Image: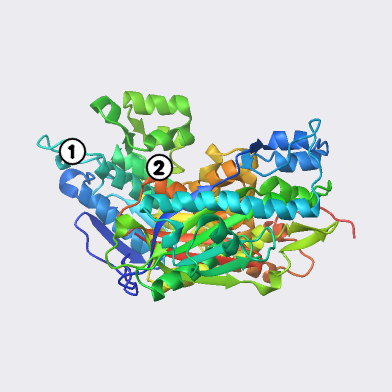
């Protein structure tokens, strides 16, 4: 993927993994409109980059993000909703990106920072990371985290986080289901690398279909959903990945048996 | 790898524009439950096909129930119904389309009518000229039997005329009296068709004129067809008791799903566009499964397909007229801006997928 310089981000590529670091150290990586545009640009480029399989989203200098940068707003003109609409559009693009996305959190992850984390396929943090959605307590709304958070942690806990601005420690975010794993800071890089190594190679088209179905599962009737599932599965089983799977399978072997680890005793079968 | 911009270089400076759209349906509207009652249908399989939940109402030309039951229509009655319906809703759609432009049938230079739900000679254009007072020297074309995709084939025809004749007005009228191809024989195949198709007509005026702007309507920039000859039998007319009856293969959604990306990639690639730059999608309301197939193979959301889903729910599958009902719904929403682009997709017998690219 072609690398560009951004005012608010540091983007690096290693193999097929692209790391996007929020980078406004003077403000604790606070999210301003420039960062929204920069993120949108990166995501646009990533979408078309055939040589990238994973996007890692993280902060810099020990902080993920302290949330929205209010200095973009001014009392001289009425605040408009369109900047926030751009933010939400960009968020949706990350959520539906045709790459596997991993959020890696160090230090504070506040407001818009946590909103970004909720968009990612995998979410890990170091033990001292803290999470908070202080917006309601401050007098506005935590974006579409109002839509996403309860799906991770349930309505009761989401009310607790959104309405009171409660600060969550990493262990709590882990046990509630926001995070997949928590590590000591010294182990974080190694753990991230292992996570990615285990994941690759992945089938981006199938991943995208599976994620779309999971995201839609919350708002669908079974009868509506099954049609979408069958259309997606039809696409998957006509893809290259499934073709190779069949090619590799010894004659007479069923697909699911390929995944049975070798040390697992096979159920006896009648011939 | 470089970013592509959303504007296209190969756009002609003044492509023909769609200036207006009009639609019409028969006066009588039926719920799926009503129809099952009129046909006294008790077979649970057929009932569940009707009550699948993706269609709530359809406008149809059906006879008055006798003692609460639908009388059987003869072949002659079905053929007469097709012509009568074409003239009634066809002329209503034309009037609704021409009125906002201050045009009368007399002002139209090219009249193209299409229908797949009945065969007649002389064609629909001749009958509409007699009924509505088009000029005696109006150029005309009748397209019959091309099926649900035909609307875009017709749009190609009027766009080509408009391109070759600047300032002249070309009128496309899609009229489908699907109830004239209804056979009720308690068979699952005919039940699928009878549960799905509705009656409707849609008309658009296309004109090329350098003075027109995006506010007058979108330019019709390009077309890209795709035909799958191996699937020629997937959708077709057959005869049931000497009546025309439409047949739909159960694999259609999958055939369409496997192939729809091909014409779309060619169409968008030619204009250096990407799917995500397209603001509006106008897809034929073929049925729930085929809409799903397109959604998951092109990565379109329910929001992208809201007009398609809305038309299916309120009108059923209106064959070649469906996508223009979606276009009208988009116009009424007025959520488009200058330089917005729309992709139209229709699919039908052949098996064929037709696509068109518009830009405001």
Give the left or right position of residue B265, taking residue B75 as reference: left
Q: A84 and B263: which one is in front?
A: B263
A214, above or below A159, in the image = below
Image coordinates of residue A254 in percent, x first then y, are 75, 61
Q: Are marks 1 and 2 on the same chain?
A: yes
Residue B16 in sight from this viewpoint: yes
A104, above or below B348, in the image = above
| Residue A118: assigned label | 2
How many marks can you see? 2
Image coordinates of residue A90 in percent, x first then y, are 34, 50
Q: What residue is shown with label 1?
A: A70
Instruction: Quadrant for the C terminus of chain A, please.
Output: bottom right
Q: Chain of mark 2?
A: A
Which is more N-terminal, label 2 or label 1? 1
Which residue is pictured at 57% across the width and 45% down the height? B25
Instruction: Quadrant for the N terminus of chain A, please.
Output: bottom left
Q: Chain of mark 1?
A: A
- Marks 1 and 2 sit apart, C-alpha to C-alpha, by 22 Å
């Amino acid at each position: 993927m072609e690398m560009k310089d951004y005012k608010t981000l540091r983007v690096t590529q290693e193999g097929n993994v692209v790391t996007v670091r929020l980078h406004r150290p003077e403000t604790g990586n606070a999210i301003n409109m420039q960062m929204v545009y920069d993120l949108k640009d990166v995501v646009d480029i990533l979408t078309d980059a055939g040589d990238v399989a994973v996007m890692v989203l993280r902060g810099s200098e020990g902080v993920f993000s302290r949330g929205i940068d209010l200095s973009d707003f001014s009392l001289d003109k009425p605040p408009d909703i369109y900047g926030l609409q751009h933010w939400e559009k960009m968020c949706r693009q990350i959520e539906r990106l045709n790459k596997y996305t991993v959020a890696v959190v160090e230090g504070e992850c506040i407001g818009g920072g946590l909103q970004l984390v909720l968009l990612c396929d995998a979410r890990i943090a170091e033990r001292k990371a803290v999470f908070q959605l202080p917006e309601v307590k401050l007098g506005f709304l935590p974006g579409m985290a109002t839509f996403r958070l309860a799906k991770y942690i349930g309505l009761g806990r989401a009310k607790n986080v959104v309405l009171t601005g409660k600060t969550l420690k990493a262990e709590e975010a882990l046990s509630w289901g926001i995070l997949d794993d928590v590590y000591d800071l010294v182990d974080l890089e190694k753990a991230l690398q292992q996570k990615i190594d285990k994941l690759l190679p992945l089938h981006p088209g199938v991943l995208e279909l599976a994620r779309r179905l999971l995201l839609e599962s919350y708002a669908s009737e079974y009868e509506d959903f099954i049609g979408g599932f069958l259309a997606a599965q039809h696409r998957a089983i006509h893809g290259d990945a499934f073709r190779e799977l069949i090619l590799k399978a010894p004659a007479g072997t069923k697909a699911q048996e390929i995944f049975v680890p070798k040390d697992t005793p096979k159920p006896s079968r009648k011939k | 790898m470089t970013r592509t911009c959303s504007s296209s270089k190969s756009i002609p400076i003044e492509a023909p524009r769609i200036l207006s759209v009009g639609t019409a349906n028969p006066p009588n509207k039926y719920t799926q439950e009503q129809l099952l009652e009129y046909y006294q249908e008790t077979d649970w399989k057929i009932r569940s096909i009707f009550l699948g939940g993706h269609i709530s109402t359809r406008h149809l030309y059906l006879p008055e129930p006798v003692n609460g039951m639908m009388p059987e229509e003869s072949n002659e009655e079905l053929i007469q119904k097709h012509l009568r319906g074409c003239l009634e809703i066809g002329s209503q759609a034309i009037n609704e389309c021409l009125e906002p432009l201050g045009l009368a049938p007399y002002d139209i230079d090219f009249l193209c009518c299409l229908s797949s739900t009945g065969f007649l000679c002389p064609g629909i254009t001749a009958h509409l000229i007699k009924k509505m007072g088009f000029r005696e020297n109006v150029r005309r074309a009748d397209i019959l039997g091309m099926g649900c995709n035909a609307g875009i084939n017709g749009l190609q025809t009027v766009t080509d005329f408009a391109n070759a004749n600047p300032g002249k007005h070309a009128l496309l009228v899609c009229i489908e009296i699907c109830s004239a191809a209804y056979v009720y024989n308690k068979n699952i195949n005919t039940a699928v068709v009878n549960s799905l198709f509705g009656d409707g007509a849609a008309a658009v005026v296309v004109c090329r004129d350098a003075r027109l702007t995006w506010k007058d309507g979108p330019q019709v920039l390009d077309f890209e067809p795709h035909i799958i000859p191996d699937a020629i039998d997937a959708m077709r007319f057959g005869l049931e008791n000497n009546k025309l009856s439409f047949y739909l293969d159960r694999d259609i959604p999958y055939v369409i799903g496997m192939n729809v990306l091909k014409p779309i990639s060619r169409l968008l690639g030619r204009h250096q566009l990407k799917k995500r730059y397209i603001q509006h999608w106008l897809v034929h309301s073929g049925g729930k499964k085929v809409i799903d197939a397109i959604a998951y193979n092109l990565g379109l959301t329910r929001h992208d397909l809201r007009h398609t889903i809305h038309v299916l729910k309120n009108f059923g599958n209106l064959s070649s007229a469906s996508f223009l009902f979606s276009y009208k719904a988009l116009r009424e929403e007025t959520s488009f801006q200058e330089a917005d682009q729309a992709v139209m997709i229709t699919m039908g017998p052949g098996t064929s997928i037709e696509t068109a690219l518009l830009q405001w």
